[in-house]
Image: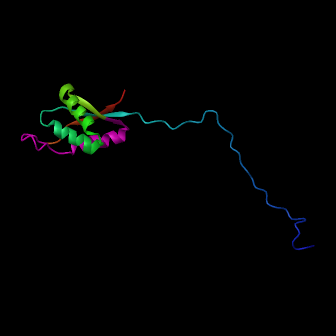
Amino acid sequence: MDEHSNVGVEEPVEQVIVRPKRRHEKKPKRQPPFHVILWNDNDHTYEYVIAMMMELFGHPLEKGYQIAKDVDQLGRAVCLTTTKEHAELKRDQIHAYGKDDAIAHCKGSMSASIEPAE
């Protein structure tokens, strides 16, 4: 028998496993959205709110102004709608932002909360 001959030698067979398609494959569930709410007080200026919105949320000047106006006129404003964990982070960042140096009697940051978006 020639040493280069393949006669009588079985070659390995590849096994292919085919997974049948499932008709109702589940898509990942989306996390329910939450609003970050900024609450009004008389201890912070429009400039403070605008600067905070630009720094913490990346909002442009115009959006920061609109949020400051809504807080002043409506008593509250939605700053962002996002996942619960991200909303909690942003709320905590608002609470840690510090006082408004333009107002002498300002004692600290603005108040914020989160709530489920409807």
How many numbered marks are there?
0
In the figure, is residue 105 to the left or right of 67?
A: left
Q: Position of residue 73 (x, y in %)?
A: 19, 26
Q: Position of residue 11 (x, y in %)?
A: 82, 61
Q: Position of residue 19 (x, y in %)?
A: 68, 43
Query: Looking at the rendering, which quadrant does residue 7 occupy?
Result: bottom right
Query: Please, which residue is most extreme toward the left here?
Result: 104
In the figure, is residue 101 to the left or right of 3?
A: left
Q: How is the image coloured?
A: rainbow
Query: Looking at the rendering, which quadrant does residue 46 occupy?
Result: top left
- Compared with residue 98, is residue 78 higher up or lower down, i.e. above or below? above
Point out the image quarter for the N terminus: bottom right
Point out the image quarter for the C terminus: top left
Q: Position of residue 94 (x, y in %)?
A: 23, 42
Query: Looking at the rendering, which quadrant does residue 18 occupy?
Result: top right
In the figure, is residue 45 to the left or right of 63?
A: left
Task: Tell me the magenta residue range.
Answer: 80-107
* Residue shown at the point (86%, 65%) measured from the top left: 9
* Residue shown at the point (20%, 38%) measured from the top left: 49
